[in-house]
Image (cartoon, helix red, strand yellow):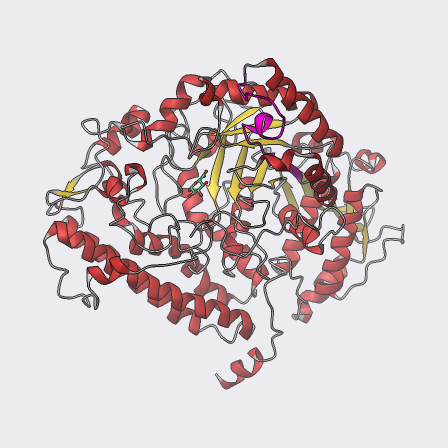
């Protein structure tokens, strides 16, 4: 033990800035020899800015990890790595690759060991230079993970065409639902000051295949569309371009009035359409490869086409026509609901959008959150997936942990993302998973995509919680390939971010994989949802009861002396009927509805006998206590790992885990004491009883919780 501690004290303190691109020196000399022997030369012919970036990245990786200086001036190709892009047509023909590369498309690549007249080459080839950059990061990842590279035969093609981060960043640099400091976009100093962080941002994203970024908040500010800002956006786009990343903006629907001097923003008004057309032209003058617009309209007070009695399709199509000549897209969000609609909020997006299926222009995505309410710790998949045969649907996940403990809780989100993606919509028969809707294969959409609401900010380690990085990473990897498992992704990330030592991985990986279920258990088990404190959504608030019913916790839990849960069955709000009959019937029947979604779909008596044999109340107590217990176990497990990583990052995580443990207990106690008023049943004796009263929890007041304005 003593020797371990001794070794650990020599591990260089790290602050997490390098993310998973640490290119740590390989200490294992045997492995190092093996790598060095197959990598005598590295050649990357090509003059594009992306080829330059590939050379830069390989140079950094090889010198840091392998202690090998790379000389790109050396034209001879010996045993080693040869990167081939469309710039090297002679090599493509020499190795007979053109057919294969065509199939892999512009972002795909292959990495293959071949014997070329006695020379052992690793070919890394793509039809396009950005594909070769993705392949480069893949190759470097193999080295970072200490993988065997003696016989490679890899071919990769992303499953979706649009893989975006959505920043909810405001122009004053606050970040809506951001818990990692301020926005990394330093608008005030742009375009003249280019922070080196912009390039590191692009590298990190390209390394996981992200190819677009929406720079601004969905609650949009029209000013971003003014010329003064377009220059700044162009400066960012120039940094991102070699990395294959396009910039996108949020479009405030009322911009023609707010900054255009028009009297209306009616999408069917010719002057309005003309205003957007010329605005698009102007943007493309600054940013020739501008990606397009993301729009939140007629939702939570945002302006939109319905202000003029027009439909969402009218609004989306007007913008789509403006960007179409330049190859841009519009991502129109389905996150719409109105408190004036007295029915279940969960019904509204589907009711609004389903009738518009087939009415959108070809370059419109409808961007749909993973569930019908709002990024909850657990939600059934959104019924629009599988419900819009004629419209490409873009998945919107939330990487930032708005409803999952902000940046102090370790919650690895890949299992949440996967759970939605693997859900079967049955829309086109068994096996019609949400993933197949999203990747376009179910209905053969040409465009397909995912968006992840970013958790990035100015904190030195980017994401606040060191493990927040794993969610950025996992999102990108799944947008590239949704068939990857949460387990594989966690292992990749851990090896690159911390250490390849399996003794470390074998403890932390299961901890990560269980962490989401743990959070569900201590926050909102059994299908409960939207029980977070008012507005900032940090901590429990089952008692929240304000003027707007659909923003109260009472609206969602509906607890009374008879039971708890939202009846969305056919005899309740009938939200179940928005799903395919196969799914509907399963959710509708209290016997076949899984425990996970029980209170999402049913109002259930407190003494209802659960599958486990417990009553509902006992089961609820069990879930809350096990969630809090698991949070404590995470603290203990992490404590055993001191010797494997640098003290600085170990301590950072250790402190946050203790916060999580404390808050898990807070959640458990507050929720159970509150619901106990309705169940009238005791918390079983075997559990340690809450040491505070319900009033204590209800009277806690918080100010300046991060992530929102007007605290
Ligand atoms: C909710 C957030 C709010 C966002 C909104 C949205 O609380 O800050 O503006 O989603 O997605 O989850 O538009």
Choose top left, top right, bottom left or bottom right for residue 692: bottom left
The residue at the point 29 percent across, 50 percent down is 524
Q: Give the range drawn in magenta.
A: 246-267
Q: Which residue lies furthest to the bottom in this view?
A: 2
Total marks shown come to 0
Nearer-the-camera pick, 141 or 333: 333
Residue 37 image point, x, y percent: 76, 61
Q: Is residue 673 magenta?
A: no
Q: Residue at x 53, y 44 (%)?
A: 168
Residue 694 picture location, percent across and down: 20, 59
**For residue 437, above or below residue 460:** above
- Left or right: residue 556 versus residue 414 is left
Q: Does the magenta stretch include residue 263?
A: yes
Residue 10 lies in what quarter of the image?
A: bottom right
Across and down, in percent, residue 577 comes to 28, 25
**Which of 691/499 is in front?**
691
């Amino acid at each position: 033990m003593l020797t371990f501690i001794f070794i650990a004290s020599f591990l260089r303190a790290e602050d997490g800035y390098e993310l998973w691109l640490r290119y740590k020196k390989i200490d294992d000399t045997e492995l190092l020899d093996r790598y060095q022997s197959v990598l005598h030369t590295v050649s990357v012919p090509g003059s594009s800015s992306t080829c330059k970036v590939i050379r830069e990245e390989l140079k950094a990786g090889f010198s840091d990890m392998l202690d090998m200086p790379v000389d790109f001036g050396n034209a001879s190709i010996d045993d080693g790595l040869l990167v081939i892009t469309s710039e090297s047509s002679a090599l493509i023909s020499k190795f007979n690759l053109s057919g294969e590369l065509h199939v892999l498309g512009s972002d795909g690549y292959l990495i293959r060991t071949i014997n070329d007249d006695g020379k052992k080459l690793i070919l890394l080839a793509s039809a396009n230079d950005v594909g070769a950059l993705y392949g480069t990061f893949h190759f470097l990842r193999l080295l970072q993970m200490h993988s065997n590279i003696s016989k490679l035969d890899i071919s990769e093609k992303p499953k979706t065409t649009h893989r975006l981060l959505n920043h909810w960043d405001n122009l004053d640099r606050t970040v809506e639902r951001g818990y990692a400091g301020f926005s990394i976009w330093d608008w005030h100093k742009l375009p003249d000051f280019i922070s080196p962080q912009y390039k590191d941002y692009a590298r990190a994203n390209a390394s996981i295949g992200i190819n677009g970024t929406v720079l601004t908040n969905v609650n949009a500010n029209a000013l971003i569309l003014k010329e003064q800002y377009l220059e700044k956006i162009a400066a960012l786009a120039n940094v991102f371009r070699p990395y294959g990343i396009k910039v996108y903006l949020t479009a405030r629907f009322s911009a023609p009035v707010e900054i255009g001097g028009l009297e209306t923003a009616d999408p069917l008004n010719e002057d309005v359409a003309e205003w957007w057309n010329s605005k698009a032209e102007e943007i493309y003058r600054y940013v020739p490869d501008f990606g397009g617009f993301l729009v939140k309209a007629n939702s939570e007070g945002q302006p939109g086409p319905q202000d003029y009695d027009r439909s969402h399709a009218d609004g989306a199509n007007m913008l789509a026509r403006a960007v179409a000549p330049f190859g841009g897209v519009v991502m129109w969000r389905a996150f719409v609901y109105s408190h004036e609609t007295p029915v279940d909020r969960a019904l509204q997006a589907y009711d609004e959008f389903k009738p518009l299926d087939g009415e959108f222009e070809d370059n419109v995505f409808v961007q749909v959150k993973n569930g019908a309410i709002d990024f909850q710790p657990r939600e059934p998949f959104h019924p629009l997936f599988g419900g819009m045969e004629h419209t490409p649907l873009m998945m919107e996940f939330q990487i930032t942990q708005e409803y999952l403990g902000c940046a102090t809780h370790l919650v690895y989100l890949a299992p949440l993302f996967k759970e939605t993606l693997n859900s079967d919509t049955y829309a086109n028969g068994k096996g019609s998973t949400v993933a197949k809707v999203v990747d376009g294969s179910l209905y053969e959409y040409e465009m397909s995509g995912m968006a992840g609401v970013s958790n990035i900010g100015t904190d030195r380690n980017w994401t606040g919680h060191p493990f927040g990085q794993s969610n950025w990473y996992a999102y990108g990897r799944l947008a590239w390939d949704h068939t990857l498992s949460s387990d594989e992704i966690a292992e990749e990330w851990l090896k690159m971010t911390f250490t390849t030592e399996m003794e470390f991985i074998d403890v932390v990986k299961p901890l990560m994989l269980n962490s989401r279920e743990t959070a569900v258990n201590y926050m909102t088990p059994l299908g409960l949802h939207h029980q977070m404190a008012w507005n900032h959504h940090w901590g429990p608030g089952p008692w929240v009861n304000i003027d707007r019913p659909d923003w109260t916790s009472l609206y969602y839990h509906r607890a009374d002396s008879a039971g708890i849960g939202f009846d969305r069955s056919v005899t309740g709000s009938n939200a179940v009927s928005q799903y395919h009959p196969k799914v509907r019937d399963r959710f509708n029947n209290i016997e076949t509805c899984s425990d996970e979604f029980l209170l999402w779909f049913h109002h259930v008596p407190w003494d209802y006998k659960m599958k486990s044999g417990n009553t509902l109340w006992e089961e609820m107590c069990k879930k809350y206590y096990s969630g809090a217990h698991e949070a404590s176990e995470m603290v203990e497990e992490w404590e055993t790992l001191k010797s494997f990583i640098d003290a600085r990052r170990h301590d950072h995580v250790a402190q946050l885990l203790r916060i999580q443990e404390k808050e898990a207990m807070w959640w458990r106690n507050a929720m159970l004491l509150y619901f106990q008023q309705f169940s009238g049943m005791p918390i079983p004796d075997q559990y340690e009883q809450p040491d505070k009263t319900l009033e204590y929890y209800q009277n806690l007041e918080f100010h300046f919780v991060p992530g929102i304005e007007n605290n």
